[in-house]
Amino acid sequence: MRRIQPVLAVAALMAAIVGEGWLRKKVYQFYEAYVSVLDLIDGTAALVPGRGRASSLRRSPKSSPRSL
């Protein structure tokens, strides 16, 4: 029984190393897809005349009915 504990410890360590590598690869793939989608959105917004980022839009001078 005592001989099994070191074997389990080594197996757990190897699983953690392999799992970390797999997780890092998945995160990198997700990041690449996320950046691609952002580039696609920015490219599409650049093609539409008069459109910019939401932060660059000005507020309407008219008061909204909710503020009355």
Image: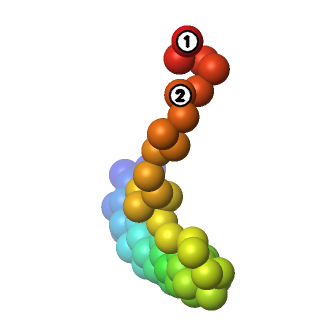
Count of marks, rendered view: 2
Residue beneath label 2, please? 63
Please say if the residues under marks 2 and 1 sit with CB atoms less than 8 Å apart. Answer: yes
Q: Position of residue 33 (x, y in %)?
A: 58, 80
Q: In this rendering, would 13 be left or right of 43?
A: left
Give coordinates of residue 24: x percent, y percent: 44, 75
Disc 2 versus disc 1: distance between alpha carbons? 8 Å
For the residue pair 68 and 5, the one nearer the viewer reads as: 68
Whether residue 14 is visible: no
Residue depicted at 57% across the width and 72% down the height: 51
- Tell me the residue that label 1 is attached to: 68
> Label 2 sits on what residue type?
Ser
Q: Position of residue 41 (x, y in %)?
A: 60, 77
- Left or right: 4 with respect to 26? left
Q: Secondary structure at mark 2?
A: loop
Residue 21: give x, y in percent of width and height.
Answer: 43, 78
